[in-house]
């Protein structure tokens, strides 16, 4: 992939869409990290970790519903374990 870096730079210089998307992607990631840091300060590391796990499961199930893609057995088991863990944590 490193051999294609020059090609990427050429496209980057000429494509306004790529420039815009690259800046917006960086900005979104920065804002995500800021929000994660603020959440961590308020909740603590364990709660933030559990919330992050729940977020991943929610995103996975939501995207499967939106795209109509069927979840594999491994994904279903993983989602069940994650949701069960979050439930147990919230009850303790």
Image: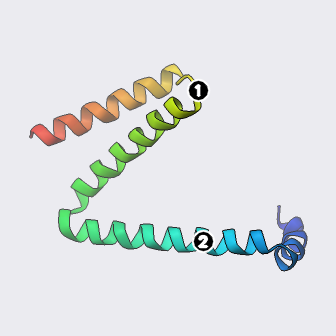
Provide the residue designation for mark 2.
24
Provide the residue designation for mark 1.
69
Give residue 22's position: percent from left, percent from top: 67, 71
Q: How far apart are labels 2 and 1 at the CA level? A: 28 Å
Q: Dot 1: few (<14), some (14–19), or many (≥20) neighbours within 10 Å?
A: few
Q: Is residue 5 left or right of residue 58?
A: right
Q: Is residue 30 left or right of residue 19?
A: left
Give the secondary structure at mark 2: helix
User: In the figure, 44 relative to 75: above or below?
Assistant: below
Query: Foreground: 87 or 2?
Result: 87
Specify the farthest residue to the top.
73
The quadrant the N terminus occupies is bottom right
Residue at the image point whose x is 82% and y is 75% from the top: 12
Give residue 78's position: percent from left, percent from top: 41, 30
Looking at the rendering, which quadrant does residue 25 occupy? bottom right
Q: Is residue 11 left or right of residue 40?
A: right
The quadrant the C terminus occupies is top left
User: In the figure, 23 relative to 78: above or below?
Assistant: below
User: In the figure, 71 relative to 17: above or below?
Assistant: above
């Amino acid at each position: 992939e490193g051999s294609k870096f020059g090609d990427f730079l050429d496209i980057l210089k000429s494509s306004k869409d790529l420039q815009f998307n690259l800046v917006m992607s960086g900005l979104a990631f920065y804002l995500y990290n800021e929000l994660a840091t603020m959440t961590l300060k308020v909740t603590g590391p364990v709660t933030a970790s559990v919330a992050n796990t729940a977020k991943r499961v929610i995103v996975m199930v939501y995207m499967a519903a939106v795209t109509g893609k069927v979840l594999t057995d491994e994904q279903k088991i993983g989602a069940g374990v994650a949701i069960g863990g979050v439930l147990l944590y919230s009850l303790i």
